[in-house]
Amino acid sequence: MASKPVISLGPVLRKLDPLLPELEALYKDVHSHPELSMQETRTAALAADRLSAAGFKVTTGVGKTGVVGLLRNGDGPTVMLRADMDALPVQEATGLPYASKITAKDREGNIVPVSHMCGHDMHVTWLVGATKLLAEAKTTWRGTLMAVFQPGEETAEGAQAMIDDGLFKRFPKADVVLGQHVMVGPSGTVAGRAGAITSSADSLQIRLFGRGAHGSMPQASIDPVVMAASTVLRLQTIVSRELAAAEAAVVTVGALQAGTKENVIPDEAIIKLNVRTFDEGVRKRVLSAIHRIVNAEAAASGSPRPPEITTLDHYPLNVNDAEATHRVAEAFRGHFSAERVRLTGPAPASEDFGSFGTEWHVPSVFWFVGGTDPDVYAKAKEAGRLNELPVNHSPMFAPVIHPTLRTGVEALVVAAQAWFFAQQGAH
């Protein structure tokens, strides 16, 4: 049996220590200046400047605000590394000295607070660090490195926007697509799995129609509030009564809006809900059940017209290629200590990262990097209080900078080198 190629990462990562202060400053800068989805002009410019300085050929404005950097370094595989850039309309409550105080106008024209409560600022910094290190160690690998800074992940539109703007036609086809996400977990660890790694997600808006009347005369109305309330309760039975115990799904109603005054029965009500699934068959059954229940409740109430059901966004199921995942895991185990490389179950969160591999028909691998202070995580776990730790999208979500920053840069470099060295051997 042929021996595995020895991966010597010293020449690539030896400059990471002196680079960390610069990366920390970049992270705090991006954290302090968050931008909403598809508005990431400042962040994109920072990424483009860093790529240009590292010797990449840079293309900006891909899918509106996306950035693609290419570093061609001889014959070999093309490895795509991806980071998302957008922030959330959330008021930050971390109290950090570099906390966001930014507000911005959303697409509906509302002024909203903006903050990086999902960690995309860390993702940007990781990719800047990894590309700089790999560019400075070009004699140690051969191939093409493709860095993609993606907009609009939070609204499920950025990956598709870049694809629709010719990502697959304008740039060389990747042999593998690699990405990662900071999550709750001990900082310094990485975690992943083959197969489904994040769920598919469907967000829907349901508009129910009634007939308004005075609150004292409900007999003259068709009450959309009661209609909506009945609908919300019945939707909860989809998971509890229509799916088998071994089938996973989440149906969450996040908004129910109707009326403006206590003694006025309104004409209509709005329900906004979110569905998470890990199997396409389950997804179709859940969505079908939603339509059935919504229409049946409207009919039972005597609604004057059928409900309007609108898709707000859709995230595809993110599936890690088995062979590529094995290669990444082996590379991680060869670099990190065994206890720092963990197997995880599929996460109910969703990502549009999967669109790149699925639509390009190339293997992709996505993994998680822990961002929680290890002592805080250990104490919470011992006390059975892990669910009390601030999670992504919480106004209190704040990954510890060290060693999260180092770990994420190392993980991207190690994963990329697994392909470059597999083709060319160690140097």
Image (spheres, rainbow, N blue to C red):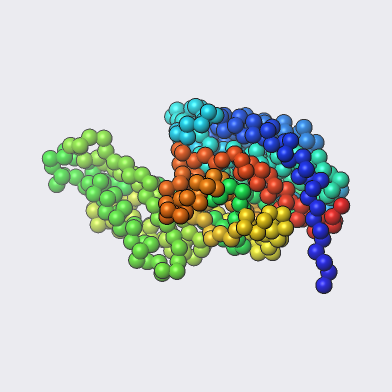
State the quadrant of the N terminus.
bottom right
Q: Residue at x 24, y 53 (%)?
A: 301
Tell me if residue 118 can be seen. Answer: yes
Q: Considering only vertical position in the picture, is 246 above or below 109?
A: below
- Residue 151 in the image: state x and y as whole percent: 60, 39
- The front one of 174 and 411 is 411
**Side (left or right) of 94 relative to 32:** left
- The front one of 375 and 51 is 375
- The front one of 17 and 114 is 17
**Side (left or right) of 215 relative to 404:** left
**Side (left or right) of 25 relative to 302:** right
Tell me if residue 82 can be seen. Answer: no
- Residue 244 in the image: state x and y as whole percent: 41, 69
Q: Residue furthest left?
A: 216
On the image, which quarter does residue 196 sit in? Answer: bottom right
- Residue 183 in the image: state x and y as whole percent: 54, 48
**Side (left or right) of 136 relative to 222:** right
Q: Residue at x 57, y 33 (%)?
A: 31
- The front one of 173 and 135 is 135
Q: Residue at x 39, y 52 (%)?
A: 252
- Residue 383 in the image: state x and y as whole percent: 42, 53
Please give the count of numbered marks on the rendered protein. 0
On the image, which quarter does residue 12 sit in? Answer: top right
Q: Residue at x 69, y 32 (%)?
A: 22
Q: Considering only vertical position in the picture, is 13 above or below 232?
A: above
